[in-house]
Image: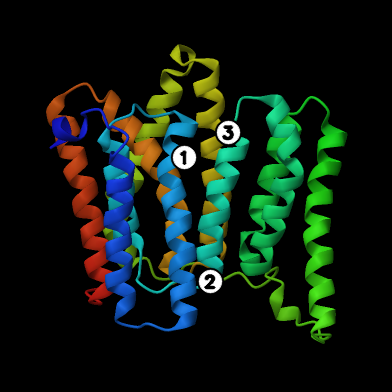
Amino acid sequence: MFRLLSKESNIFSIPVYIGFLLLVVIIINSLNFNTYEATIAIITFIGISLGYFCFNAIALNYQTHLPLFLYTFFVLGLYPGKLDIGIAVALLTNSFLLLLLTSTDEDLRKKSYVLVGSILALNFIFLPTTWPMIFFVLIHLIVTSERISLNIFRFVLGMSLIALSYFSLMFFIRFNDWNMDYLPFGKMRFITDYIELIPLIPLVLMLIYAIYDHFSHYNKKSPVSRYKYTFLLVFSFAQIVTIVMYMNTNYEYLLLLAFPTTIILSRMLRFLPKLWMQELSLWLIIVSLVGFKAGTHFNLF
């Protein structure tokens, strides 16, 4: 199966995967259809679909079916069928952030910081628990920018524009009360029951090995590859902070890691020395996701 997925993808591959994903989303949501759920499903579908195009934009994987297949499987394995609108918006905004911030063009990045700030502010409005991403982008901005002060100003300006628009809208529709529960700080809900996450242990171990292997051969990587892979790791860390502090048993939060995990594991599979290792690891990923899906759906644990 690994050899089959290692074949080069073509221009029709992504539409086929997106079409299959759309079919699954329609089938799942047709059982509980209403306007609100349909809106969330559309936002989720767009956000996940953009992820397919991010593979080519980030260019950390060879253009094969492997990352596309794994990404589809991760989404199906982690998608609970019913998402909070905050998670749906976060999936959408994360795709845009990845497209903008992984660009190696400094001129493009500095022009996009206003947009990045706006995206993060919008993300915070819909899902306040994603606040670690704001600090991640700030660190990324400071480390990679030549004109730090100016770019921070652009970033803050983008956030301020969305904040001003939001408060103006709330004032206009007479929502004048402030609910302190909206702020997530001090309301952490750490995971206390890990039983349902047991099927994902092989994935965690493979991720650890993949990161270890990357840094073991760090000097052999191109500067662009180092930059993008490091960005992806820090991006993933920001998501993990949110997951650890706020997920509890809301496992849809794991969808935030579907894209970066796919890239990391796809690269690991690609560089394993033996075909049987690649095949075994691929099937282990599939079995782990199927086991997690079955466990959460049928309450097996």
Give, as a three-letter code, the residue at label 1: Cys
The image quadrant where one finds the C terminus is: bottom left
Q: x, y (%) of residue 196?
A: 31, 67
Q: Which residue is drawn at 33% across and 66% down?
A: 25
Which class describes the residues within 10 Å of circle 1: few (<14), some (14-19), or many (20+)?
some
In the picture shown, does residue 260 fall above or below 253?
above
The image's mark for residue 54 is: 1
Give, as a three-letter code, the residue at label 3: Thr
Q: Residue at x 32, y 38 (%)?
A: 67
Which class describes the residues within 10 Å of circle 3: few (<14), some (14-19), or many (20+)?
some
Dot 2 corresponds to which residue? 85
Marks 2 and 1 close (CB-CB < 8 Å): no
The image's mark for residue 102 is: 3
Tell me: 244 left or right of 144. Answer: left
Q: x, y (%) of residue 116?
A: 69, 46
Q: Residue at x 58, y 54 (%)?
A: 93
In the picture shown, does residue 16 fall above or below 147?
below
